[in-house]
Amino acid sequence: MFYKLTGYLADFKTLKNQSRMDIVFLLTFFILLFVPMVKLDTKVFSEKELRILATYQPFIMDKNINYDWGNNYNNYFSDHFYLRDEIISYFDKFKYYIAYKNYVLPNHALLNKETQWGFRLEPYSLAVYDKLSENTVKHIISNLQRLNEFCNSHNIKFYLVVVPAKEDIYKEQNVYMPAGKTENFHQIYEYAKKNTDLKIIFPSEQFKSLAKENFVFFKTDHHWTDYGAFIGYTLLAKEIKKDFPGFMSDTITDYNISKNTLVRSDFTREYTTGQTLYAFLNLDDKKISEKVLDVEYPYYNHKKHKSLKIDIDYDNKIKDFYFPAKNNLTAIEIGNSMSENFNDILPYSFKHLKYMRANNTKRKFVDEIKMSGYEKEILKIKPDILILTISSAYIIPLKNMYEREN
Protein backbone atom coordinates (compact mmCIF):
# COMPACT_ATOMS: atom_id res chain seq x y z
CA MET A 1 0.00 0.00 0.00
CA PHE A 2 2.84 2.37 0.87
CA TYR A 3 4.65 1.45 -2.38
CA LYS A 4 1.56 2.14 -4.50
CA LEU A 5 0.91 5.41 -2.68
CA THR A 6 4.42 6.71 -3.34
CA GLY A 7 4.04 5.57 -6.95
CA TYR A 8 0.89 7.64 -7.32
CA LEU A 9 2.57 10.66 -5.78
CA ALA A 10 5.56 10.33 -8.11
CA ASP A 11 3.28 10.37 -11.18
CA PHE A 12 1.51 13.68 -10.37
CA LYS A 13 2.73 15.56 -13.39
CA THR A 14 -0.25 16.40 -15.58
CA LEU A 15 -3.94 17.07 -15.26
CA LYS A 16 -4.74 13.64 -16.66
CA ASN A 17 -3.57 12.16 -13.34
CA GLN A 18 -5.93 14.34 -11.30
CA SER A 19 -8.07 11.32 -10.41
CA ARG A 20 -5.14 9.95 -8.44
CA MET A 21 -5.32 12.98 -6.17
CA ASP A 22 -8.90 11.98 -5.38
CA ILE A 23 -7.64 8.58 -4.27
CA VAL A 24 -5.00 10.17 -2.03
CA PHE A 25 -7.61 12.52 -0.56
CA LEU A 26 -10.03 9.70 0.19
CA LEU A 27 -7.26 7.56 1.67
CA THR A 28 -6.11 10.41 3.90
CA PHE A 29 -9.69 11.19 4.91
CA PHE A 30 -10.42 7.64 6.06
CA ILE A 31 -7.11 7.44 7.90
CA LEU A 32 -8.04 10.64 9.78
CA LEU A 33 -11.35 9.06 10.77
CA PHE A 34 -9.39 6.60 12.88
CA VAL A 35 -7.43 9.30 14.75
CA PRO A 36 -10.16 9.87 17.42
CA MET A 37 -10.00 6.13 18.19
CA VAL A 38 -6.25 6.17 18.87
CA LYS A 39 -6.69 6.72 22.61
CA LEU A 40 -10.05 6.77 24.37
CA ASP A 41 -9.87 8.27 27.86
CA THR A 42 -11.27 6.50 30.92
CA LYS A 43 -12.75 9.48 32.77
CA VAL A 44 -16.01 8.84 34.62
CA PHE A 45 -16.88 12.42 35.60
CA SER A 46 -16.00 15.65 33.81
CA GLU A 47 -14.98 18.38 36.25
CA LYS A 48 -15.02 20.82 33.37
CA GLU A 49 -18.53 20.00 32.15
CA LEU A 50 -19.83 19.10 35.64
CA ARG A 51 -21.51 15.88 34.51
CA ILE A 52 -21.13 12.11 34.55
CA LEU A 53 -19.73 10.82 31.26
CA ALA A 54 -21.20 7.92 29.29
CA THR A 55 -19.85 4.45 30.12
CA TYR A 56 -19.20 1.59 27.73
CA GLN A 57 -21.90 -1.08 27.54
CA PRO A 58 -21.07 -4.40 25.78
CA PHE A 59 -23.09 -5.86 22.93
CA ILE A 60 -23.94 -8.88 25.12
CA MET A 61 -25.18 -7.94 28.59
CA ASP A 62 -26.22 -10.61 31.11
CA LYS A 63 -26.30 -13.18 28.28
CA ASN A 64 -28.77 -11.00 26.34
CA ILE A 65 -28.29 -8.85 23.27
CA ASN A 66 -28.03 -5.14 24.05
CA TYR A 67 -30.32 -3.82 21.31
CA ASP A 68 -29.38 -0.23 22.20
CA TRP A 69 -25.68 -0.95 21.75
CA GLY A 70 -25.34 1.45 18.80
CA ASN A 71 -26.69 4.45 20.72
CA ASN A 72 -24.74 3.47 23.83
CA TYR A 73 -21.48 3.24 21.92
CA ASN A 74 -22.16 6.51 20.09
CA ASN A 75 -22.62 8.30 23.42
CA TYR A 76 -19.55 6.61 24.90
CA PHE A 77 -17.37 7.47 21.91
CA SER A 78 -18.65 11.08 21.86
CA ASP A 79 -17.59 11.52 25.49
CA HIS A 80 -14.17 9.87 25.30
CA PHE A 81 -12.57 10.27 21.85
CA TYR A 82 -8.93 11.32 21.53
CA LEU A 83 -8.25 15.08 21.95
CA ARG A 84 -11.95 15.69 22.59
CA ASP A 85 -11.49 18.60 25.02
CA GLU A 86 -9.01 20.35 22.74
CA ILE A 87 -11.14 19.97 19.61
CA ILE A 88 -14.32 21.20 21.32
CA SER A 89 -12.45 24.08 22.94
CA TYR A 90 -11.10 25.35 19.61
CA PHE A 91 -14.49 24.94 17.97
CA ASP A 92 -16.34 26.84 20.73
CA LYS A 93 -13.80 29.68 20.67
CA PHE A 94 -14.27 29.93 16.90
CA LYS A 95 -18.05 30.16 17.36
CA TYR A 96 -17.61 32.79 20.08
CA TYR A 97 -15.55 35.08 17.87
CA ILE A 98 -17.92 34.90 14.90
CA ALA A 99 -21.04 35.41 17.06
CA TYR A 100 -22.52 38.91 16.72
CA LYS A 101 -24.16 39.82 20.04
CA ASN A 102 -25.22 36.66 21.87
CA TYR A 103 -22.98 33.61 21.82
CA VAL A 104 -25.57 30.85 22.24
CA LEU A 105 -25.42 27.10 22.66
CA PRO A 106 -29.13 26.26 22.11
CA ASN A 107 -30.83 24.56 25.09
CA HIS A 108 -27.61 24.93 27.06
CA ALA A 109 -26.26 28.43 27.75
CA LEU A 110 -25.59 31.90 26.37
CA LEU A 111 -23.20 34.82 26.80
CA ASN A 112 -24.12 38.37 25.85
CA LYS A 113 -20.90 39.71 24.28
CA GLU A 114 -21.92 43.33 24.93
CA THR A 115 -22.87 43.08 28.62
CA GLN A 116 -20.82 39.93 29.47
CA TRP A 117 -23.81 38.35 31.25
CA GLY A 118 -23.97 34.56 31.00
CA PHE A 119 -27.02 32.37 31.64
CA ARG A 120 -27.87 28.69 31.52
CA LEU A 121 -30.58 27.75 29.05
CA GLU A 122 -30.92 24.04 29.73
CA PRO A 123 -34.38 22.65 30.68
CA TYR A 124 -33.50 22.42 34.39
CA SER A 125 -32.87 26.17 34.65
CA LEU A 126 -35.83 27.27 32.55
CA ALA A 127 -38.15 24.93 34.47
CA VAL A 128 -38.31 27.58 37.22
CA TYR A 129 -40.98 29.23 35.05
CA ASP A 130 -43.18 26.13 34.74
CA LYS A 131 -46.34 26.61 36.75
CA LEU A 132 -46.74 23.99 39.48
CA SER A 133 -49.98 22.12 39.88
CA GLU A 134 -51.91 22.54 43.12
CA ASN A 135 -51.21 18.88 43.96
CA THR A 136 -47.47 19.40 43.50
CA VAL A 137 -47.46 22.44 45.78
CA LYS A 138 -49.43 20.61 48.49
CA HIS A 139 -47.24 17.51 48.15
CA ILE A 140 -44.03 19.51 48.62
CA ILE A 141 -45.52 21.40 51.58
CA SER A 142 -46.59 18.06 53.09
CA ASN A 143 -43.00 16.78 52.78
CA LEU A 144 -41.59 19.90 54.41
CA GLN A 145 -44.13 19.68 57.23
CA ARG A 146 -43.21 16.05 57.77
CA LEU A 147 -39.54 17.04 58.12
CA ASN A 148 -40.55 19.87 60.45
CA GLU A 149 -42.55 17.46 62.63
CA PHE A 150 -39.58 15.08 62.75
CA CYS A 151 -37.38 17.96 63.92
CA ASN A 152 -39.91 19.15 66.50
CA SER A 153 -40.21 15.65 67.95
CA HIS A 154 -36.45 15.72 68.62
CA ASN A 155 -36.32 19.33 69.86
CA ILE A 156 -34.65 20.56 66.66
CA LYS A 157 -35.57 23.82 64.92
CA PHE A 158 -35.88 23.51 61.13
CA TYR A 159 -35.19 26.34 58.65
CA LEU A 160 -35.43 26.19 54.87
CA VAL A 161 -33.21 28.62 52.92
CA VAL A 162 -34.15 28.85 49.24
CA VAL A 163 -31.91 30.81 46.88
CA PRO A 164 -33.91 32.51 44.11
CA ALA A 165 -33.03 31.81 40.48
CA LYS A 166 -30.55 34.10 38.76
CA GLU A 167 -32.72 33.68 35.66
CA ASP A 168 -35.56 35.48 37.48
CA ILE A 169 -33.58 38.10 39.41
CA TYR A 170 -31.67 39.29 36.33
CA LYS A 171 -34.33 38.54 33.74
CA GLU A 172 -33.84 41.88 31.97
CA GLN A 173 -30.27 40.86 31.10
CA ASN A 174 -31.45 37.82 29.15
CA VAL A 175 -33.63 38.14 26.04
CA TYR A 176 -34.21 34.37 26.08
CA MET A 177 -36.19 34.50 29.33
CA PRO A 178 -40.01 34.36 29.02
CA ALA A 179 -41.65 37.71 29.63
CA GLY A 180 -44.35 38.23 32.25
CA LYS A 181 -43.49 35.17 34.35
CA THR A 182 -41.95 34.67 37.78
CA GLU A 183 -40.28 31.59 39.18
CA ASN A 184 -42.60 28.89 40.44
CA PHE A 185 -41.19 28.60 43.97
CA HIS A 186 -43.32 31.66 44.78
CA GLN A 187 -46.32 29.30 44.67
CA ILE A 188 -44.81 27.11 47.40
CA TYR A 189 -43.64 30.10 49.44
CA GLU A 190 -46.99 31.89 49.39
CA TYR A 191 -48.92 28.72 50.23
CA ALA A 192 -46.58 27.97 53.14
CA LYS A 193 -46.95 31.49 54.58
CA LYS A 194 -50.75 31.25 54.53
CA ASN A 195 -51.21 27.67 55.69
CA THR A 196 -48.22 26.56 57.76
CA ASP A 197 -45.74 27.68 60.40
CA LEU A 198 -42.74 26.58 58.29
CA LYS A 199 -39.75 28.91 58.52
CA ILE A 200 -38.76 29.58 54.90
CA ILE A 201 -36.16 32.18 53.91
CA PHE A 202 -36.68 33.09 50.25
CA PRO A 203 -35.07 36.51 49.56
CA SER A 204 -36.53 37.08 46.10
CA GLU A 205 -37.97 40.54 46.87
CA GLN A 206 -34.78 41.65 48.63
CA PHE A 207 -32.63 40.45 45.75
CA LYS A 208 -34.73 42.22 43.12
CA SER A 209 -34.55 45.52 45.02
CA LEU A 210 -30.76 45.28 45.37
CA ALA A 211 -29.82 43.59 42.10
CA LYS A 212 -29.43 46.74 40.01
CA GLU A 213 -26.88 48.37 42.33
CA ASN A 214 -25.13 45.24 43.59
CA PHE A 215 -24.33 41.81 42.25
CA VAL A 216 -26.30 39.19 44.17
CA PHE A 217 -25.29 36.63 41.52
CA PHE A 218 -22.11 36.26 39.49
CA LYS A 219 -22.34 37.32 35.85
CA THR A 220 -20.62 34.14 34.63
CA ASP A 221 -21.97 31.71 37.21
CA HIS A 222 -25.45 30.71 38.47
CA HIS A 223 -24.58 30.86 42.20
CA TRP A 224 -25.19 33.74 44.57
CA THR A 225 -22.24 35.95 45.48
CA ASP A 226 -20.86 36.43 48.99
CA TYR A 227 -22.94 39.62 49.07
CA GLY A 228 -26.10 37.69 48.22
CA ALA A 229 -25.24 34.96 50.71
CA PHE A 230 -24.79 37.52 53.49
CA ILE A 231 -28.29 38.86 52.80
CA GLY A 232 -29.58 35.30 53.15
CA TYR A 233 -27.64 34.87 56.39
CA THR A 234 -29.10 38.10 57.84
CA LEU A 235 -32.66 36.95 57.09
CA LEU A 236 -31.96 33.49 58.53
CA ALA A 237 -30.48 35.02 61.69
CA LYS A 238 -33.71 37.01 62.24
CA GLU A 239 -35.72 33.78 62.16
CA ILE A 240 -33.29 31.98 64.48
CA LYS A 241 -33.52 34.82 67.02
CA LYS A 242 -37.28 34.20 67.28
CA ASP A 243 -36.55 30.67 68.53
CA PHE A 244 -33.31 31.45 70.34
CA PRO A 245 -33.64 35.01 71.75
CA GLY A 246 -30.02 35.08 72.88
CA PHE A 247 -28.68 34.24 69.39
CA MET A 248 -25.90 36.65 68.38
CA SER A 249 -25.47 37.06 64.65
CA ASP A 250 -22.48 38.47 62.79
CA THR A 251 -22.53 41.88 61.16
CA ILE A 252 -20.54 43.21 58.23
CA THR A 253 -17.98 44.63 60.71
CA ASP A 254 -16.97 41.06 61.60
CA TYR A 255 -15.50 40.57 58.11
CA ASN A 256 -12.60 41.80 56.03
CA ILE A 257 -13.71 42.34 52.43
CA SER A 258 -11.45 41.70 49.45
CA LYS A 259 -12.16 42.09 45.71
CA ASN A 260 -11.61 39.69 42.83
CA THR A 261 -12.87 39.43 39.25
CA LEU A 262 -12.76 35.63 39.46
CA VAL A 263 -15.58 33.48 40.81
CA ARG A 264 -15.54 31.32 43.95
CA SER A 265 -18.65 29.19 44.25
CA ASP A 266 -17.94 25.48 44.72
CA PHE A 267 -16.91 22.90 47.32
CA THR A 268 -13.13 23.26 46.85
CA ARG A 269 -13.34 27.06 47.30
CA GLU A 270 -11.07 27.62 44.31
CA TYR A 271 -11.37 30.70 42.11
CA THR A 272 -12.50 30.09 38.53
CA THR A 273 -13.93 32.03 35.58
CA GLY A 274 -17.43 30.85 36.55
CA GLN A 275 -19.30 27.64 35.78
CA THR A 276 -21.50 29.21 33.10
CA LEU A 277 -18.40 30.38 31.25
CA TYR A 278 -16.07 27.41 31.57
CA ALA A 279 -18.47 24.47 31.98
CA PHE A 280 -21.62 25.39 30.06
CA LEU A 281 -20.04 27.56 27.34
CA ASN A 282 -16.56 25.98 27.35
CA LEU A 283 -14.93 29.43 27.12
CA ASP A 284 -12.03 29.14 29.54
CA ASP A 285 -9.65 30.86 27.11
CA LYS A 286 -7.41 33.45 28.80
CA LYS A 287 -8.07 36.26 26.27
CA ILE A 288 -11.83 35.71 26.41
CA SER A 289 -11.80 35.56 30.21
CA GLU A 290 -9.89 38.83 30.50
CA LYS A 291 -12.56 40.54 28.41
CA VAL A 292 -15.61 38.89 29.99
CA LEU A 293 -14.63 39.16 33.67
CA ASP A 294 -15.34 42.87 34.05
CA VAL A 295 -16.64 43.00 37.66
CA GLU A 296 -14.76 42.95 40.95
CA TYR A 297 -16.88 40.94 43.39
CA PRO A 298 -16.58 41.44 47.17
CA TYR A 299 -15.47 38.38 49.14
CA TYR A 300 -16.14 38.12 52.86
CA ASN A 301 -13.35 36.80 55.08
CA HIS A 302 -14.18 36.56 58.78
CA LYS A 303 -11.69 38.40 60.98
CA LYS A 304 -11.41 35.29 63.18
CA HIS A 305 -11.17 32.76 60.35
CA LYS A 306 -7.95 31.36 61.80
CA SER A 307 -9.99 30.07 64.76
CA LEU A 308 -12.24 28.06 62.43
CA LYS A 309 -11.34 24.38 62.21
CA ILE A 310 -12.63 22.43 59.20
CA ASP A 311 -12.62 18.65 58.74
CA ILE A 312 -13.31 17.72 55.11
CA ASP A 313 -14.46 14.45 53.57
CA TYR A 314 -13.86 15.08 49.87
CA ASP A 315 -15.24 11.71 48.73
CA ASN A 316 -18.69 12.32 50.21
CA LYS A 317 -18.51 16.13 50.18
CA ILE A 318 -18.98 16.59 53.91
CA LYS A 319 -17.51 19.38 56.03
CA ASP A 320 -17.44 19.74 59.80
CA PHE A 321 -16.89 23.32 60.98
CA TYR A 322 -15.80 24.00 64.57
CA PHE A 323 -15.63 27.55 65.93
CA PRO A 324 -15.56 29.15 69.42
CA ALA A 325 -18.86 30.88 68.67
CA LYS A 326 -20.71 33.20 71.02
CA ASN A 327 -23.74 30.96 70.57
CA ASN A 328 -23.60 27.60 72.31
CA LEU A 329 -25.48 25.92 69.43
CA THR A 330 -24.86 23.04 67.04
CA ALA A 331 -26.36 22.77 63.57
CA ILE A 332 -26.60 20.46 60.61
CA GLU A 333 -26.86 21.88 57.11
CA ILE A 334 -27.98 19.82 54.13
CA GLY A 335 -27.76 21.58 50.79
CA ASN A 336 -26.76 21.74 47.18
CA SER A 337 -24.04 23.96 45.71
CA MET A 338 -25.82 27.12 46.91
CA SER A 339 -24.53 26.20 50.37
CA GLU A 340 -20.90 26.77 49.43
CA ASN A 341 -20.77 30.58 49.55
CA PHE A 342 -23.24 30.49 52.46
CA ASN A 343 -20.66 28.44 54.35
CA ASP A 344 -18.11 31.23 54.31
CA ILE A 345 -20.49 33.00 56.71
CA LEU A 346 -22.75 30.50 58.48
CA PRO A 347 -20.17 28.43 60.50
CA TYR A 348 -19.11 31.40 62.65
CA SER A 349 -22.49 31.40 64.41
CA PHE A 350 -22.22 27.81 65.72
CA LYS A 351 -19.78 25.85 67.83
CA HIS A 352 -20.26 22.94 65.41
CA LEU A 353 -21.83 23.02 61.96
CA LYS A 354 -21.95 19.75 60.02
CA TYR A 355 -22.53 20.28 56.31
CA MET A 356 -23.59 17.48 53.99
CA ARG A 357 -23.62 18.23 50.26
CA ALA A 358 -26.77 16.81 48.69
CA ASN A 359 -25.59 16.76 45.07
CA ASN A 360 -22.30 14.96 45.56
CA THR A 361 -22.38 12.75 42.37
CA LYS A 362 -23.17 9.68 44.53
CA ARG A 363 -26.91 10.31 44.82
CA LYS A 364 -29.42 10.28 42.00
CA PHE A 365 -30.88 13.73 41.42
CA VAL A 366 -34.37 12.77 42.59
CA ASP A 367 -32.93 11.37 45.84
CA GLU A 368 -30.56 14.20 46.73
CA ILE A 369 -32.60 15.28 49.77
CA LYS A 370 -34.32 11.95 50.45
CA MET A 371 -34.55 12.19 54.23
CA SER A 372 -34.06 8.49 54.95
CA GLY A 373 -30.44 9.06 53.94
CA TYR A 374 -29.96 11.78 56.55
CA GLU A 375 -32.15 10.93 59.55
CA LYS A 376 -29.58 8.59 61.09
CA GLU A 377 -26.90 11.30 61.07
CA ILE A 378 -29.34 13.89 62.39
CA LEU A 379 -30.32 11.66 65.31
CA LYS A 380 -26.67 10.83 65.96
CA ILE A 381 -25.75 14.49 66.46
CA LYS A 382 -29.15 15.79 67.61
CA PRO A 383 -28.35 19.40 66.69
CA ASP A 384 -30.19 22.44 67.93
CA ILE A 385 -30.86 23.52 64.36
CA LEU A 386 -31.36 21.87 60.97
CA ILE A 387 -30.86 24.07 57.89
CA LEU A 388 -31.80 22.98 54.39
CA THR A 389 -30.12 25.26 51.81
CA ILE A 390 -31.24 24.75 48.21
CA SER A 391 -31.85 26.54 44.92
CA SER A 392 -35.40 27.40 43.90
CA ALA A 393 -35.15 24.98 40.95
CA TYR A 394 -34.94 22.02 43.36
CA ILE A 395 -38.59 21.06 42.79
CA ILE A 396 -38.02 17.40 41.86
CA PRO A 397 -35.90 16.55 44.95
CA LEU A 398 -38.44 18.35 47.15
CA LYS A 399 -41.17 16.11 45.71
CA ASN A 400 -39.11 13.03 46.55
CA MET A 401 -38.05 13.74 50.12
CA TYR A 402 -39.92 10.71 51.38
CA GLU A 403 -41.02 8.61 48.43
CA ARG A 404 -40.12 8.27 44.77
CA GLU A 405 -42.45 9.88 42.27
CA ASN A 406 -42.99 8.29 38.86
Image (cartoon, grey):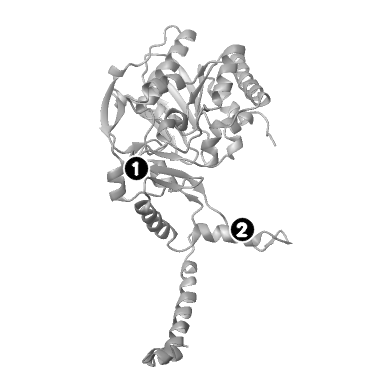
Q: Which residue is mark 2?
A: 72
Q: Residue at x 37, y 17 (%)?
A: 325
Q: Secondary structure at mark 2?
A: helix
Mark 1 and mark 2: span between their CA atoms? 33 Å
Of the two numbered discs 1 and 2 on the same chain, state the one appearing first in sequence. Answer: 2
**Which corner quadrant holds the C terminus?**
top right
Q: Is residue 393 visible?
A: yes
Total number of numbered discs in the rendering: 2
Q: Name the one closer to the observer, 262 or 190.
A: 190
Q: Which residue is mark 1?
A: 273
Q: Residue at x 43, y 48 (%)?
A: 48
Give the image quarter of residue 117. top left
> Disc 2 residue type?
Asn
Q: Residue at x 42, y 31 (%)?
A: 172
Question: Do labels 1 and 2 touch, CB within 8 Å?
Answer: no
Q: Secondary structure at mark 1?
A: loop
Say left or right for 31 vs 268. right
Q: Position of residue 183 (x, y in %)?
A: 52, 28
Q: Position of residue 155 (x, y in %)?
A: 57, 13
Q: Residue at x 53, y 34 (%)?
A: 358
Q: Name the one closer to the observer, 4 or 239.
A: 4
Q: Position of residue 281 (x, y in %)?
A: 42, 47
Q: Is residue 143 above or below residue 93?
A: above
Q: Name the one closer to the observer, 150 or 260.
A: 260
Say left or right for 289 vs 7. left
Please rate how many residues cluster around mark 1, counting C-alpha atoms within 10 Å: few if below 14, some from 14 to 19, many from 20. Answer: many
Q: Position of residue 153 (x, y in %)?
A: 62, 14
